[in-house]
Structure formats: C-alpha cells, structure tokens
Amino acid sequence: MDIRPLSIAGAFEVTPRQFHDDRGTFMEGFRIDHLAAAIGHEFHVRQSNVSVSRAGALRGIHHAAVPPSQAKYVTAASGVFIDFVVDLRVGSPTFGQWDSVRLDSVDRRAVYLAEGLGHALACLEDGTAVYLCSEVFNPAAERGINPLDPTVGLALPEGFVPIVSDKDAAAPTLEAAAERGDLPTLEACLALDAALAERSR
C-alpha cells in the first residue's frame, strides 16, 4: 500500500494495492506495521463504526478532547465520499486549514487522522463508511465545529446540498470554539504523540 502525507501534519492518505481476478478483488485494507512506519507508532483499534449515509449528508466537523482524543482510519465500503481533515490544534502552523481525499469503492483509499484533528465526511452518493478508532466513544469528550463555518470554508462539490444534523448545525464556529477553550493545543497533541511512540517501542 502507498501511504502519502496530507498537507495537515498527522493526516495521511492510504491507497491499497488491489489484486483482481475472475472471482473479484482482494486487498489489504489496513496494516498496522505499514501505518506505524508512517505515523511513528502503532495504531491500535478499540472501536469500529459503520456510517450509512444518503447523498448530501455532511457529518462533522468532529473531534475529541486531548488526551486521549481519538485517532481515526476511515474508508468507504460503498458509495462516494469526500473526507475532510481539519487542523484544530491551536498553535499549529496550519491551524484552521484543511485537506481532503475522495473515498470510494474504486480506488478504495483510506484516510488516517491523528488525535486532535477534526474530521468531516460529505456523502456524494448513497454509501457506507467504516471508521476504525483508537479509543472508544466518550460522549463527555466529544467536540464539534459547524461544518458550514465560512472561516473553515470546506470546499463542497458544486451542486452539493448539505444535509446537516441539528447537533452539527448548532456546533460553534472555529473562532467561538477557540475563545471558549474547546480546541486542543498543538503542544498537547505532540506530547500525546510522543507518549504513543514511546509505548510502541
């Protein structure tokens, strides 16, 4: 598999090598050793989520308090999605910026995003996304940014009419979240990353 860093530090695009024959297709969807070589520590899966979405669904921008936060490895089982990774780490040189990857059942790419990064998923065609998570869901630690915040400015495809949950629509803007101290700091995220690397030795 090919693992390419995105423009947001701590986020990677993973493109598997696919093997086709008369029976269909086989691939390695996740390899702990290959991913560890890229991110500097092992990614241990503690929870798996399955998200079934209709075209137009826009989920996010979600993140979790640091520590422990929640790293994610996201791929599409069916359908087409645009996966957005948003840098929410106060003090980061790319704070407030984002990068994106198209997830579908053709290239079968995945996105890895480290703890402290924000995540949003835009569904272009009815489909199912699978999330592998480094920590179990903790409602008390969950945070969000409004995915339509113009300051973040996610570039949704032309003609895309977003369907947003009431919870996500009521989420604060990036500026408001920063003012009330709801965002992680780059320092805390780097300390967590160092601790995970030490644990993996």
Image (cartoon, rainbow, N blue to C red):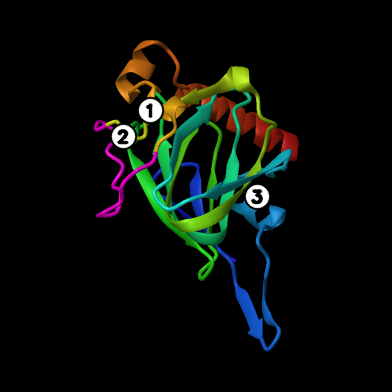
Q: Which mark is residue 169?
A: 1
Residue 42 x/y as whole percent: 69, 44
The residue pinned by badge 3 equals 36
The residue at 70%/55% (across/down) is 33
- Amino acid at circle 3: Ala
Quarter of image, res 19: bottom right
Q: Is residue 91 visible?
A: no
Residue count near mark 2 (Cα–Cα under 10 Å), binned few <14, some 14–19, many ≥20: many
Residue identified by numbered label 2: 148
Give the amino acid at mark 1: Ala
Residue at point 65% right, 57% down?
Answer: 34
Label 1 packing within 10 angstroms: few (<14), some (14-19), many (20+): some
> Horizontal placement of 164 versus 152: left or right?
right
Q: Is residue 21 above or below residue 16?
A: below
**Residue 1 appears left or right of 82:** right
Please check the rendered image and state whether residue 152 is part of the magenta-colored stretch, yes or no. yes
Helix, strand or loop for disc 2 = loop
Q: Is residue 126 in the magenta section?
A: no
Using the numbered discs, state the Cα–Cα distance from disc 1 to disc 3 in whole angstroms.
35 Å
* Magenta region: 150-163
Task: Estimate the spatial distance between the alpha carbons at disc 3 and disc 2, rounded to whole Å.
Answer: 33 Å
Say which of 92 and 26 sits in front. 26
**Foreground disc of the pair 1, 3:** 1
Residue 93, placed above or below residue 98: above
Q: Residues within 10 Å of mark 3 (few under 14, many from 20)?
A: some
- Mark earlier in primary sequence (1, 3): 3
- When the figure is inspected, residue 112 is found, relative to residue 80, above or below; the finding is above
